[in-house]
Image (cartoon, rainbow, N blue to C red):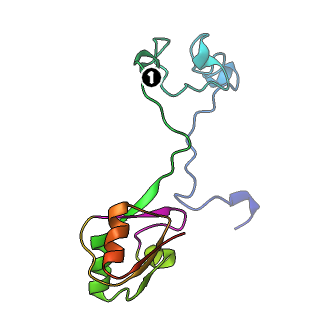
Amino acid sequence: MDLSNLQPAEGSVHNQNKRVGRGQGSGKGGTAARGHKGAKSRSGYSKKIGFEGGQMPLQRRVPKFGFKNINRKEYAGVNLDTLQALVDNGTITDTVDFNVLVQNRLATKNEEVKILGRGELKAKLKVSAHKFTATAKAAIEAAGGEAVSL
């Protein structure tokens, strides 16, 4: 073994690219297999998303309507029957705060939580959340609990 017969290990080298644009002798000189003229022959060409060859793109042909409220707040909804199920499992006993909801994967740490009124709550709970529906708040207080807005 010496410097004259070093070679990479079998299967470690995969480069089988054609070396284009390296002169006429290579057979891929001149236009470098890109054809003549046009956007695709230029360096730096990249087709835009939704480009349809110059035809008016679908996204521009279809009529637009309505609007997106950029100030809308999204809440992770947690229903009363879900809280009751956690009480039945023994996961929670008396207080439900944001950390408990995150640990039980009912919300993520970046979300805001809204307690919704589906189902019934029998347990006396102190529930802390960002928002409550009127029915949920009434049901929590009817069970002897407390609804605390964060």
Point out residue 134 in the picture as x, y percentages from the top left corner. 37, 61
Q: Which residue occupies 59% across, 27% down?
A: 46
Relative placement, left or right, of 147 versus 81 is: right
Point out residue 20 in the picture as x, y percentages from the top left corner. 63, 28
Q: Which residue occupies 24% across, 69% down?
A: 119
What amino acid is at disc 1?
Gln
Q: Which residue occupies 58% across, 33% down?
A: 18
- Using the rendered view, name the quadrant where residue 47 is placed: top right
Point out residue 7 in the picture as x, y percentages from the top left corner. 64, 58
Count the marks: 1
User: Secondary structure beneath disc 1?
Assistant: helix
Relative placement, left or right, of 49 versus 90 is: right
> The N terminus appears in which quarter of the rendering?
bottom right
Task: Check the image and report above or below for 25 versus 86.
Answer: above
Task: Check the image and report above or below for 81 versus 58.
Answer: below
Q: Which residue occupies 55% across, 63% down?
A: 110
Magenta region? 105-117
> The C terminus appears in which quarter of the rendering?
bottom right
